[in-house]
Image (cartoon, grey):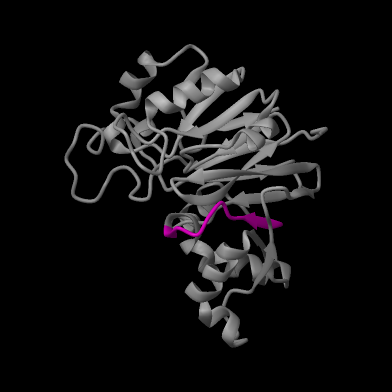
Amino acid sequence: MVYLCRVKIILLGTGTSQGVPVIGCDCQVCVSVDPLDKRLRSSALLTDGHTNVLIDAGPDFRQQMLCHRVKHLDAILLTHEHNDHVIGLDDIRPFNYRSGEAMSVYALPRVASEVRRRFDYVFSEQIPGLPRIELVGLDQDSALQFGRICIQAIGVMHGRLPILGFRIGDLAYLTDVKTIAEPEMKKLAGVKYLVVTALHRQEHPTHMNLEESLAFIQKLQPERAWLTHVSHHMGLAADVNLELPDNVQLAWDGMEISW
């Protein structure tokens, strides 16, 4: 398989479903003034300078779009249906107004059904002021192209839940992952840059912990890797980064990777 594209990814959020700081928490990470310890819910923007594709639209979607001055989106890809990845879809309305068109939202059939249920008011009546969503089916073998952005879907397991990761040229974006079957690992062959889940240090049933993520990186051998979907339990970014291999860092909100 040939991967050809020049694109930039902006990590709009690198936190867990609760974000960091966590409401009501006084741990050293949640009270830290270091910007690297502030994490919105996980999401990423792919751009080639003209075409913009979003991966996941969680509860911080509006804030992320405003912070990065995103004025148009060409499509949204959903990794899975959990609230921290989809519940911001109501805020696509300004993009609908600007384009005059429905937003194309690509998702697994199961995820599309859940979006229809959760946003029933969007699909049941055409009322002015409601978001307009066009759901487009996606599976783990889907290959997509938007402008110069070439995307290969990758099937991964979020515990026992099949979800999607994505390879975009030389970079792979894998959030909320616990395991990947060997056939899907083949899609990651030769990847140079990797953004992958590392929830915290303890064992977790649905996410890789730090030890598992580092073992996965060692197996895949990318040039550089960044850890995302990070919990406040991981520790202060400044301390954790000192422990990591030279080619691995904690990702941070707003970081950009170009290739």
Task: Give the x, y percent position of residue 55.
Answer: 59, 49
In screen coordinates, is 109 left or right of 85?
right
- Residue 73 shows in the view: no
Residue 211 vertical placement versus 243 (above, below): below
133 or 79, which is in the foreground? 79
Quadrant assignment for the C terminus = top right
Q: Quadrant of residue 30?
A: top left
84 or 51, which is in the foreground? 84
Q: How many marks?
A: 0
Task: Give the x, y percent position of residue 73.
Answer: 67, 56
Residue 1 colored in magenta in the image: no
In screen coordinates, is 248 left or right of 171?
left
Residue 102 vertical placement versus 235 (above, below): below
Quadrant assignment for the N terminus = top right
Residue positioned 45% across, 49% down in the render: 160
Q: Quadrant of residue 35?
A: top left
Which range is magenta? 73-83
